[in-house]
Image (tube, helix red, strand yellow):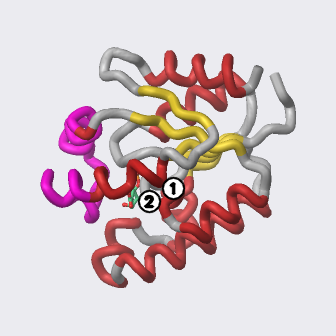
Amino acid sequence: MDSGRRIALTGFMGVGKSSVARHLSAIAKCDRLDLDAFIERNTGRTIADIIRNDGEPAYRAIETENLVSALRETNARILSLGGGTWTIPANRALINDQGVTTVWLESTFEHCWTNISKSRKERPLAKNKEAAKHLFDSRQGIYCLADWHFIVRPEFTSYEIATQIAEQVFS
Ligand code: S3P
């Protein structure tokens, strides 16, 4: 396996970025960082609380600050981004400037929505199906700027997807 490469997983809410990252870091035997969890640890607040009380622009500023720290100050080689991180041009520039390989986990809206509905994670930007679908449609053209695309089908496990990524991206 390529020992120096860092990869960042992007894709819509509910696609399974965090679970795939967990398996990928186990397969590749390297550290991982979940950007949402990193933000929550550093701020002592939940992301839902930040977005609801401070608004999305304030949240995006915090997200970018934390992305800078995650990229510069940690050894994590597998990063799972929040669903909106890659959609911000400044974040894409930071990620690309650091030579991080980006992987889009692509799936259907229905699959993501099923997972969002079942999940206990609070997602203020996906309050209802219409709002989530609108966001999903508006982001497809940006996610596709990632270096690699992997199709996530409901019948695939996170472990299987992580294995595919390890075989192809790390080979
Ligand atoms: C967001 C996705 C969330 C979280 C925040 C905003 C988005 O992460 O970062 O609620 O803009 O799509 P997940 O994709 O892990 O749910």
Q: Residue at x 32, y 15 (%)?
A: 155
Q: Amino acid under label 2?
A: Gly
Q: In the image, which is nearer the foreground, mark 2 or mark 1?
A: 2
Density class for disc 1 (Cα within 10 Å; few <14, some 14-19, many ≥20) is some
Query: What is the magenta segment's predominant secondary structure?
Result: helix
Q: Locate residue 106, reporting x and y percent.
A: 42, 35
Q: Nearer the viewer, residue 64 or 76?
A: 64
Q: How many marks?
A: 2
Residue in the foreground of this view, choosing between 45 and 33: 33
- For the point 51% across and 60% down, the residue is 85
| 171 versus 112 height, above or below | above
Q: From the image, which quarter does the N terminus lie in?
A: top right
Q: CA distance from mark 2 to mark 1?
A: 14 Å
Which label sits on residue 135? none
Label 2 beta carbon less than 8 Å to ligand 1: yes
Question: Which image quarter is the C terminus in?
Answer: top right
Q: Amino acid at mark 1?
A: Ala
Residue hosting label 1: 37
Instruction: Please report the residue visible at 62 percent of the width from the left and 28 percent of the height from the top.
Output: 24
Segment colored magenta: 110-134
- In this rendering, would 149 be left or right of 135? right
**Image coordinates for residue 121, horizontal then vertical, percent:** 31, 51
Q: Residue 84 — which label?
A: 2
